[in-house]
Amino acid sequence: MKCSTCNYTGLALAVVDAAGKPFNVCPECSTPITPAEKPWERLGIPKARYLTTQPWKTAKMERKTFEKILIHVSPEAIQCLKHEAEAERLLEAMNLK
Ligand SMILES: [Zn+2]
């Protein structure tokens, strides 16, 4: 995401408002950011790779459903999943699995 106020680029901070509705803010200037990110931006991969890897197929979902869920998942959760996948690959590489 890119903040239009301070030009911060990077992950938005996921917060919850008084009504319990999640939204994103800029971690630098706290400007609320509406989740206008593209699904591949959320995953931090280029669009071309997103379209070739078709992650919604891996998830056994309709592309629309997958993208709807993706937009509502916090960037932190995505980072967490990425790290898990990385750990998994490392373990495999070291034959520890
Ligand atoms: Zn900002």
Image (cartoon, rainbow, N blue to C red):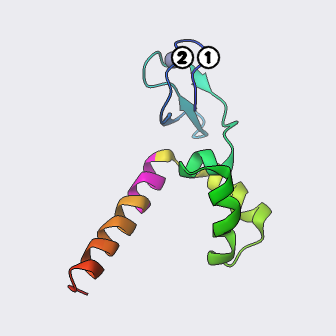
Horizontal side, residue 27 vs residue 86: left or right: right
Where does the magenta region start and end? Answer: 76-81
Residue at 50% across / 27% down in the picture? 9
**Pointer 1 and pointer 2: residues touching (CB < 8 Å)?**
yes
Q: Is mark 1 within 8 Å of ligand 1?
A: yes
Whole-percent x, y for residue 18 in the image: 55, 31
19 or 58, which is in the foreground? 58
**The quadrant where residue 56 appears:** bottom right
Vertical arrangement, residue 14 with respect to residue 85, above or below: above
Is residue 37 found left or right of 29 in the rendered image? right
Q: Which residue is mark 1?
A: 4
Quadrant where the C terminus sits is: bottom left
Residue 11 lies, in percent from the top left, at: 48, 36
Indicate the quadrant containing the N terminus: top left, top right, bottom left or bottom right: top right
Q: Which residue is mark 2?
A: 7
Q: Is residue 32 above or below residue 67?
A: above
Residue 19 horizontal side relative to residue 29, left or right: right
